[in-house]
Image (spheres, rainbow, N blue to C red):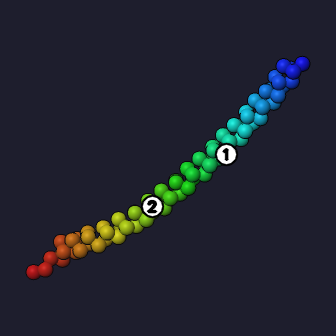
Amino acid sequence: MDVAILKEGQNNLDRRIDTIEANLKKRIDGTQTNLNKRINSVKARLNIILSVIFTGLLEIIVKPVFIKEIFPQT
């Protein structure tokens, strides 16, 4: 009788542990998904910022060169 009670208690503990593990896995997966979304958002913003900076630098560097080639000073 005592063995049956112990086995039942062990089974209950095993079920609880399985439930806790499943819940933790869901939370970890959700956190990972949220982190990936944030990372992708930051990457997109950085790409926009870098493209604006690069375009501005090209205008600053290239524009005067083309103007000098088109209208050379004599």
The amino acid at mark 1 is Arg
* Residue that mark 2 sits on: 46
The amino acid at mark 2 is Leu
Quarter of the image where one finds residue 56: bottom left
Quarter of the image where one finds residue 19: top right
Write the residue at 89% across / 18% down.
1
Of residues 50 and 5, the one drawn nearer to the viewer in this rendering? 5
Write the residue at 48% across / 56% down.
43
In percent of width and height, residue 68 lies at 18, 75
Q: CA distance from mark 1 to mark 2?
A: 28 Å
In percent of width and height, residue 41 lies at 53, 57
Regarding residue 69, the answer to whether it shows in the image is yes
54 vs 17, left or right, is: left
- Tell us which disc is closer to us: 1 or 2: 1
Q: Residue furthest left?
A: 74
Q: Which mark is first along the chain, 2 or 1? A: 1
Secondary structure state at the residue bearing disc 1: helix
9 above or below 71?
A: above
Q: Residue furthest bottom?
A: 74
Instruction: Quarter of the image for the C terminus: give it.
Output: bottom left
* Residue that mark 1 sits on: 27
